[in-house]
Each structure stands twice: as structure tokens, then as C-alpha cells.
Amino acid sequence: MHRDTRPRLRPRERDAIIQSLRAGVTPRTGLQHIQVGRAREVESLLKDIERIADGGSAFRLVIGEFGSGKSFFLQLIRAIALEKGLVTLHADLAPDRRLHATGGQARNLYAELLRNCSTRTKQDGNALTSVVERFITEARKEVDVRGGNVGTAIEERLSSLSELVGGYDFAKVIEAYWQGHESGNDQLKADAVRWLRGEFTTKTDARNALGVRTIVDDASVYDHFKLLSLFVRQAGYAGLLINLDEMVNLYKLSSQKARTSNYEQILRMLNDCLQGSAKYIGFLLGGTPDFLLDPRKGLYSYEALQSRLAENSFARAAGVIDYSSPSLHLASLTPEELLILLRNLRHVFAYGDESTYLVPDEALTSFLAHCSQRIGDAYFRTPRNTIKAFVDLLSVLEQGAGVQWNQLISQVHVDTEGNTDMPDVPILCDEDDGADDSLATFRL
């Protein structure tokens, strides 16, 4: 067994990783301890992050099968973006959270994203207040250098935002936060943060609390993303990265009109990023191959998106992957990479102490051989169930039940990863969504 020089893990970090993997979900912390493979994909996304910090924009669809590691990859890129000084927003789409709607679902998505706002020093979310206060701190520094008063400096820094859609009220809310800060009015500060998070549901409440005439609603969500990207830059951060996972929920919408409206919003985001009209902002969208490729309900059903997201024919003919494409298809882990992953999991389980490893190296190869016999090459193409089964095995051995690893491996049950997503989401008819399109033209 080779000598491992990696640092030991803190119990809290180790337990968070193990509990997440046993539940089949992506850990929020400690990703660097278990990350393997996909170096080219990470390298291409790192270039996107650098482009965002340089005043550009980025748009990527991360496509992979169920259980192939999409969510893990998105969280890994998010962690890298935080280290590079970006502000990140992340959320999963759901029946009540969509990119476009008329019943509040788009505003719900915006509110969830802002609740999950993170920075390098506050990676667990709820960092919006910290971003606003850092903006005020930057204005104070400017006043210290050139003189004047903080209020005037804040107005001047926000003047560029006032020219954008929704920018005037956005600037007014930031100024209201500053007034609450100066006067000790905590309620005014809380109302300003509520408005920025999209938690006001009526314009009357917003006008009474802050004196503004608009709120974040379904129609203005994307405009506020662009405002936020410029605001975080003014606050001293490198840019804004928005992670949206479970995009397959749009594919599952039963209403064709609802799907088309959401796909049009994706097209708007894609066009702005590729044409350079958006600044300091990036979008990472995670979805399945069906969400992208299905000609009836996927993104390819919308012709404008299909032409922009089509695979590079020259790369396909040469048998290589185009890592600069807007749609990035995650390559499968190789069996060798999966073996390294199991070694990492063993290391995490032992708190980073090589002397307390629960199984030897030969147990790892025996476990992979067993998985290969049970489910074939799916054990490395969609490794989620394989990883979960291995963590369960180590959990039994850790409890010291008097059994040996070679007695347990043959009893490990590993299933092929299946589609665990929700069924089609019915949409109530309204002026935007329309009715269910299944059998819409059926006649006897």
C-alpha cells in the first residue's frame, strides 16, 4: 500500500461527505477530497470563469446521464468560482421554480437563487447582505481617498445601473439599505434585502416599505440577473456565476407552450452571452441527454436552440470532444478513475489516517469486479449507485460487526441507475402556459 501524504479531515467535513454520498446526493463541502477525472472539462470551465472575471460572459449546458455526476461537477465548478472571487447563485429547478412563468414560479426560482447566494468567505448561502455591505465598504474607501460623503459616492457608483431595465429601483433599494444602516433602522435594511431577494409579492407593499414602484416579478427575473452581475462587480467581486440544476424539469412540463416559453428564455440567455451583450456573468445549466436532444420535447425541439447547440460535426467525425461547445457532454469515468475514487472514499472514511483504512487495495479491485459482473459498464458510466454501495459497505465494516470485507462483497446489491425524476408536470391553463399538448389534435 502506497504512503498517503494527504492531510487529515476534520470530523465535521468527513461526516458531511459520507452522509451525502450515502443518500445519493452531492456533498456541499470537501469536494476536493473525492474529485477524480474530467480534467479537460474542468480546464474548459476554468477558462469560462476567467472570461467572466475579465468582463465577458459564459453559457454552458452540462449534459450527462442520470447518476453520471452532473450535480457533483456543477458543485465543483461553483467551488472553483468561489475561490476565484466570484459570487455564485445555485438552485434546482422544480415544478414551482421555472425560468419563465406567469404564476410566480420564475420569481420563486429567483428567490431560491438569492437565498443560496455565496461568496468565498460565506459558502453556505445567505451572503447577499455581505455583498451589499461590501459595496458600501467600497464606497467608503473611495470617499476616504478623494473626500466627499458616502451617500453621494453610492449614488455615483449606482448611476450606471440606473440605465438598465429595473436599474433605477434597484439603485434606490441599495440607497435605502445605506439609509437604514446610517440611521440604525433595521427594518428598512431588512425590507431592502427582502426586495433584492424577490420576496415582495405586491408592488403596494414594496412602495409602502421602500418607496419603489416595481418588484422582482416573473417578467423581470433575467433583467435582475444582469443587474446583479454588475452590482457584485461594483462591490469588488470578480463576477457572478449562476448554477441551475435539474433542468430536466422543463423537459417534463406537459404543456408545449410552457416549455417553449422557458426555452425562449434559455435562448435569450444564450444569445446575450455569446454575443457579448452580458458582462461579468455566467450560466451553468445541468440536464440529461433527453432534455437536450429529444426532437419533440427537448431543447432540440426549438429550432433556434438546436442550431446553436448542435454538436460540432468535425469533432464528431474525428472522434474527439469539442470542449469549447456551449453544450458540454460529460465523459464517463474510466475504470481506473473509479478505482482512484474508491481510494479517495476509503481515505475520507478513515479521517485521512492511512493506518485506520478499513479495507486493503485488493478489496477495491474485488468490489469493482463484482459491480462489473452485476451491472456491466454502467458501474463507471453512471457511478452514483456504485459509490453509494461502497460507502454502505465501509459503514458496515466500521461498526465492527465481526465480518470481513471478502464476506460482504459478494452480498453487495448494486442496481443500474434509472430515471428517478418526477413524472410529467401538469400545468394549469392560463394566458401564458396553455393546455396539455398530449392528444391536443386527437379526433375520432
Image (spheres, grey):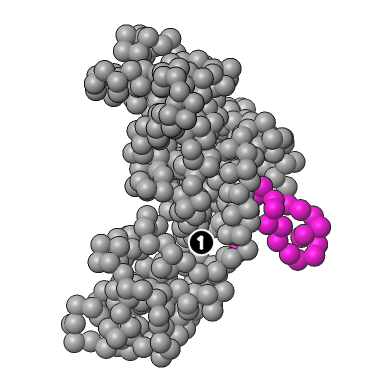
Q: Nearer the viewer, residue 385 or 187?
A: 187
Quick one: SS at disc 1?
Answer: loop
Left or right for 321, reference 181:
right
Range covered by the magenta-colored residues: 311-331
Q: Residue at x 63, y 46 (%)?
A: 51
Q: Which residue is mark 1?
A: 68
Q: How many marks?
A: 1
Amino acid of disc 1 = Ser
The residue drawn where x is 57% and y is 51% is 62
On the image, the x and y values in percent for residue 387 come to 40, 69
Whether residue 386 is visible, yes or no, is: yes
From this view, report whether residue 283 is shown above or below residue 350. above
Q: Nearer the viewer, residue 7 or 286?
A: 7
Give the quarter of the image for residue 356.
bottom left
Magenta residue check for 380: no
Task: From the top left corner, tell me how far across and down residue 439 is, in percent.
Answer: 57, 32
Q: Nearer the viewer, residue 276 or 313?
A: 276
- Provide residue 78's location: percent of width, then percent of height: 48, 51
Badge 1 crowding class, 10 Å Cα cut-off, few under 14, some 14 to 19, many 20 or more, is many
- The residue under the point 25% across, 80% down is 397
Q: Where does the N terminus fall, quadrant-wise?
A: bottom left
Image quarter in which the C terminus is found: top right
